[in-house]
Image: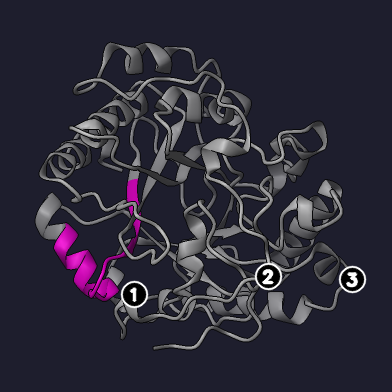
Amino acid sequence: MTAAPSDGPRLKRRGLLTIAALATLPAACGRDTTAAADAAPLPATVPSSGPVSSLAPAVTASAPASASASPSASAAAKTAKAAPASHGGGPVPFKSGQARLGAWLALSGKSLSQSLALRRQQLGRSYDIVHIFCAWNEHFERPSSIGDSTLMISWTGVKYDQINNGSNDSVIAAAARNLARQGKPTLLRWGWEMNGNWFEWDGSHNGQDTAGFVKAWKRMHGIFRDEGADNVAWNWSPNWNSGPNVSWNKMQRYYPGDAYVDWVGVSAYNFDGETPRTLLNPIVNAYGGRKPIMLSETASIDHGGNSKANWIGDLSAYVKATPQIGALCWFDTDTQSDSEHNFRIDSTSASLAAFRTMARTARFSG
């Protein structure tokens, strides 16, 4: 059992899924010596909240996806109105017509290396992106087991004023120098889901100061630039809906500006039968004409029968019909001690078959 870092944010995993990743921070951030299930959870100070899907009403409450890639999925994709960006992505370039496939992996009883080997065997391919989570003062290490895959680091935050007052400049500069020395193109996803109310770095826990988030992002971006970390691609990644769903907390209020963002990401989970259209059209329409879009975190729960497999088929169809999307990372885990849900791609033989079919399409040759 690995102790949680004393300097990290004290978080309890709510119905939302990313908190579970934080429970394995010491193991997740570049280390591959311990099975993810052995990591200690972080104690709580942030009040728990309901599922992502309950934080704000869905655009349209949709029934669970129907068999295979349904016509509704293809029709939904057509309503994504923004013309795709023709370039972008910074050091991790957007490839027109191709999408990178990746995952965060925390499989019961398996190390990252073992999990990657299992997925290679099951899918007949490697992941383009391997996603890890790191605490604020954690030393970023690139796991040797990921090979040539691109590393994506979700980096926890602190309160905005602790960045904007300069007291953490040395922490930020050290992280920048570390990644610069590694020299490989790396995705950095700082302060994700900032439009929620479950993290220390969201607007709700910072006095509704969305401008403070923007200022903090720009300060960090500038320090990385000054430290020569030009191999880092910045992934700005809100939740698909805002909680609370009020004017001051709209995702657009947290956007730092095109000059400070390489990828626009999104956390989007099918908890209550939301279609890919419901989850993804808002972010695609808002930013897909300016920046490549990444599903930084996505997964589906089972709603009975082949619902999960069908949803994966619909997701594949949506991505195929939505050229603005340049990457998709599945939240591939079954290790949440306080959740009955299994988000693994192989929770059923049908879901594995659907994911394998998606992974082998030309669209995911990125």
112 drawn magenta: yes
Residue 291 at x, y percent in the picture: 57, 36
Give the residue displayed 18% in from the left and 58% down from the top.
119
Look at label 2 and name its amino acid. Thr
| Residue depicted at 26% across the width and 53% down the height | 344
The residue type indicated by label 3 comes to Asn
* Residue bearing the label numbered 3: 165
Residue type marked 1: Ala
Q: Mark 2 or mark 3, which is nearer the start of the sequence?
A: 2
Tell me residue 359's x, y (percent). Answer: 21, 42
Residue at point 69%, 51% (across, down): 197
Sort mark 3 into few (<14), some (14-19) or many (20+) by Cα contacts within 10 Å: few
Q: Residue furthest right?
A: 165
Give the residue number, with chain letter if any, for mark 1.
36
Q: From mark 3 to mark 2, how far is it between C-alphas?
A: 23 Å
* Foreground pick, 232 / 347: 347
Camera-nearest residue between 102 and 73: 73
Instruction: Identify the magenta region.
Output: 101-119
Residue 215 disc label: none
Residue highlighted by disc 2: 45
